[in-house]
Image (cartoon, rainbow, N blue to C red):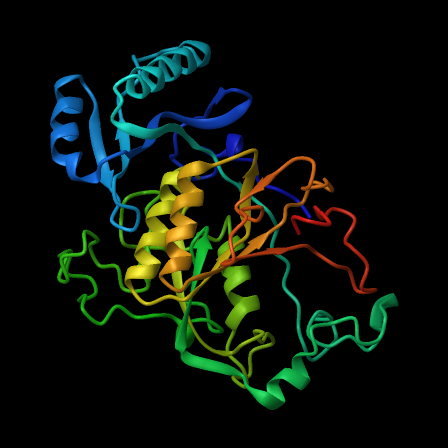
Amino acid sequence: GGQLQAAQLGQAGDAGPQVVQVGGVDVHPTHILARLRDPAQAGFVAKRLSANGYTVKRQYRLVPGMMLIERPAAPLGQAGQVARELKRRIAELQSSGWFLYVETDRAITLYATPSDAAFQDGRLWGLLNNGQNGGVDDADVDAEEAWDITTGNRQIIVSVIDTGVRYTHLDLASQMWVNEDEIAGNSIDDDFDGWVDNIHGIDPASGDGDPDDPIWQGHGTHCAGTIGAAANNDEPHVGVAWDVTLMACKIFGGGGFTSAAITSVEFSVENGATVANCSWGGIGSNPPLYDVFAAGGDAGMVFSCASGNSAMDNDLIGDWPSGFDLECVIAVAASDNRDEPAVFTNYGLESV
């Protein structure tokens, strides 16, 4: 039930930028996400922005006209000064008339902490609950009954958008998506997709093709194992759907921001993933991410999104992305081994 706050990123091997607060929300200090009214003007606008000291870091394909724009802050600026300058630049871009919206690049919070368990000794009660450890019989996902029908399909690619995945893990190595158009370890972008040596996914947080999950985090590896850890391999864990292919998209490591999540969704859709696991989010609104999830849904993607771990009513205080009013989004709360809401879980009669 713990959370890793985005404001704490930048420690324990994370070289990500420190966040600043704008309107009470933690955001990237120099990034701006904006969507053009007329995508055909992208080249013209990029040139005009460059002439005014801005850099268009990325133009997204999944949502035409969406841009990640940056203008570095003054060196050694105090957080308050940086925030005021960021707001001034957003207002400046809004006043240009080129954009449908101009938004901050919101920081993302992880919504769970990893804990290992085993199906055989009853610790994985979520798969099979026989009333062990004070639980209630059958307070589980009926995994055994489901496995009698199907154990999944290797053609289904699930994108784990998280801290990465330790793709050398004994329970995961055989489950990983493999980019067959890329040659491992040659430091060349063989398939010309903008990522070098991206064999099992990407790391848009750090801007490279290696989505390995460091041992000091492990959150994404835990989620990947819950989804699809291999079965019948003499290892103690098993996933809900063990015949599945797992793609790793690492959005924590060089920060933890909306722009990295957008890049991950785009990459996932373009490389055949049809399910994404998103155990993270934030409160309030996030128009750029909403548009990307909507486009992903139109492309056939389903998003499984954690409702949050703050014991809050999401009907009163909105959560993203779980609260996006989209057919492609499933909001997932947490239950305990007695089929009751976990004490930490967010809830909501309409939103979860």
Figure check: 39 above or below 171: above
Q: Residue furthest bottom?
A: 148
* Residue depicted at x 39% and y 16%: 87
* Residue at position x 57%, y 67% in the image: 226
Which residue is at the front of the view, 255 or 312?
A: 312
Quarter of the view holding residue 36 = top left
Relative horizontal placement of residue 26, taking residue 100 as reference (left or right): right
Looking at the rendered structure, the number of numbered marks drawn on it comes to: 0
| Residue positioned 78% across, 55% down in the render | 341
Residue 255: horizontal and vertical position, in percent? 41, 37
Left or right of 136, for residue 248: left
User: Is residue 300 visible to us here?
Assistant: yes
Q: Can you say whether 53 is above or below 212 in the image?
A: above
What percent of the width, then of the height, locates residue 37?
27, 34
* Front-lying residue, 190 or 266: 266
| Residue 250 makes an appearance in the image | no
Q: Position of residue 151 (x, y in %)?
A: 54, 83
The location of residue 75, given as percent across then percent down, is: 30, 13
Residue at (40, 45) in percent of width and height: 291
